[in-house]
Amino acid sequence: MTRIDKNPQSGDSAVSVRGLVKHYGETKALDGVDLDVREGTVRGVLGPNGAGKTTLVRILSTLLTADSGTATVAGYDVVRQPRQLRKVIGLTGQYASVDEKLPGWENLYMIGRLLDLPRKEARTRADELLERFSLTDAAKRPASTYSGGMRRRLDLAASMIGRPQVLFLDEPTTGLDPRTRNEVWDEVKRMVGDGVTVLLTTQYMEEAEQLASELTVVDHGKVIAEGAIEALKAKVGGRSLRVRPVDPAQLRPLAGWIDELGITGLATSTVDTDSGTVIVPILSDEQLTAVVGAVTARGVTLSSITTELPSLDEVFLSLTGHRASAPQDATPTLEEVAV
Amino acid sequence: MSAATATPALDVDARIPLRGHLRHTGALVRRNLLWIRQDPESMFDALLMPVVFTLLFVYVFGGSIGQALGGGQDGYVQYVIPGMIAMMSMTLSQGVGTGFSQDFNSGVMDRFRSLPIGRGSVLFAKISVELLRMLFATTVLMIVAVLVGFDIHHWAGLFAAVGLSAVFASSIMWVFLTLGVVLKNAQSVQAMGFLVLFPLQFGSSIFAPTASMPGWLQHFTDYNPLSTLADAARGLMVGGPVAHDLWITLAWSAAITAVAAPYAIHKFRTKN
């Protein structure tokens, strides 16, 4: 079937969003979002609760209509060509779910039939996907008896039945324990290996780092940063080094001395008086060593020094100067902001 | 949304053929039937309601109302059983609303709505399964009815009465589907449904003739579709005038469907 009505402007963008706005009463869930996802890539959309991530996914999967702006998925307009669009997408998320009362196999078979697969093909596809997602043993049990991880795997299998071109994963691991989360990540990586374009929303920097190649950071319905993961990491620091002097009065001078080293690339260090630490974004072990050297050279006594992957909070702190989900005018604890 | 691009508003490629609709509805009917297999207790209401109500009404009220009717308890059985068919069509219809509300809250509805299927399929499947439940309940009712002394005069009349109840029930189901889409949870759907059903059921000729009711109530019962449905069923099953009540019932069914069905589908389509 030739797709005569494919939007000629779509180019090689699998997802293209322009000026998307959605209000719920007074709240602006989306406040003019632009976004492009290239075919075959994984785009992470990172943001705190209430940033508008789910609203975005719901609009792109035609579950919700935007107030203004345009969006196309695989060249299809979300408003004018919803049915064609639904044929080429898969959706797994906090909301779109499987039927808990049905056995796993029946869930997949039903979705196969709803996607117009002939009976026989729907059957083989259900078998195949159960096998692939290691659910064959649980095929006949109602999904309500599944563990959290099995549920998510069934969700993923369900969204793969139609061999989608674009897959939306809305916080696929929220609420899962770390081991189960790793399981789901592995499955997602395999799906990505099949060449499907993925738009993934998440609250965890670590998840974005694991799965996505490019990242869009959203807050209060707006895109606040965008780019390749590596570039953003360089901006916010691959890791955070938290240096805690014994004497809090030394916080500010310490931050100044570290910045003088000029080792941290684009970002500068941040003073967090709340926890009494200087947060230094670092990209390598050499930089870590250099920071420790500088601290020692100045004769500052430290009570602790730790490194960690940046949390969502720290990403936000570096990018916007305020903490994730905190109101913008309520940042009295921060004396200095980066970027 | 702005229509800045020159592409015309075409979704032709995606128009769903009738076979597609049937396939989708079939898959969803299968789903709803599997629910029953998974959870047989969900059939208890359809099994027990006709038994309990028939026994209650026949043995509690049957004697005295029957005396007033002039046929004793046995006469009351002939009177009330057709009414019971009408009543059950209403009471069981509620199930579509509560079931629908659960689907929305569990997230499975989002899955359906993100699939390339007609919105109507989901609604039609629900209605089809509920009608099957109703037929099951009616069968149970007729078995109990015969046991307590109901005479089936002619089968054709019985089938016609059941068919008419099904027609009316499927129209009223659109109302409950609308409630299921609009209200927040299954409990509110049930509460709301009860508020609608209770006056309609008892302010009718289902359980007792309306002649002794005050005038204002008689006006209500005269136009109450449950009265006309019960009277039409009575006429079809045990004899007596049918045409007037039949037409009024069909007119009600058509009117309710014409208003509620498009509204339910619209609400379903635009629900966020």
Image (cartoon, coloured by chain):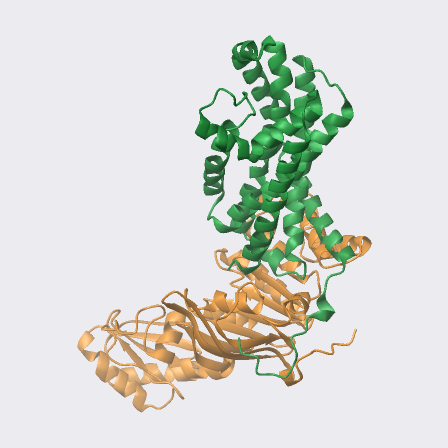
Going by the image, does B104 lie left or right of B8? left
> In the image, what residue occupies the spot 47% across and 45% down?
B185
Name the residue nearer the viewer: A337 or B142. B142
Is residue A146 visible in the rendered image? The answer is: yes
Q: Nearer the viewer, residue A129 or B196?
A: B196
- Rendered hue of chain B is green
Give x and y (percent) for residue A282. 40, 81
Q: Quadrant of residue A218?
A: bottom left
Above or below, A259 against B141 in this view is: below
The number of numbered badges drawn on the structure is 0
Please give left or right for residue A30 compared with residue A303 in the image. Answer: right
Residue B227, percent from left and from top: 57, 30
- Residue B188 image offset from top left, x and y in percent: 45, 42
Between A108 and B193, the one lying in front of the other is: B193
Residue A249: give x, y in percent of width and height. 17, 77
Q: Residue at x 68, y 66 (%)?
A: A87
Q: Which chain is orange?
A: A
The residue positioned 56% from the left and 48% from the top of the image is: B103
Residue A311 seen in render: no
Instruction: Say which of B221 and B41 sits in front.
Output: B221
Residue farthest along the right direction in this orientation: A120
Identify which residue is drawn at 60% across, 71% down: A198
Q: Is residue A113 above or below residue B98?
A: below
Q: Quadrant of residue A15?
A: bottom right
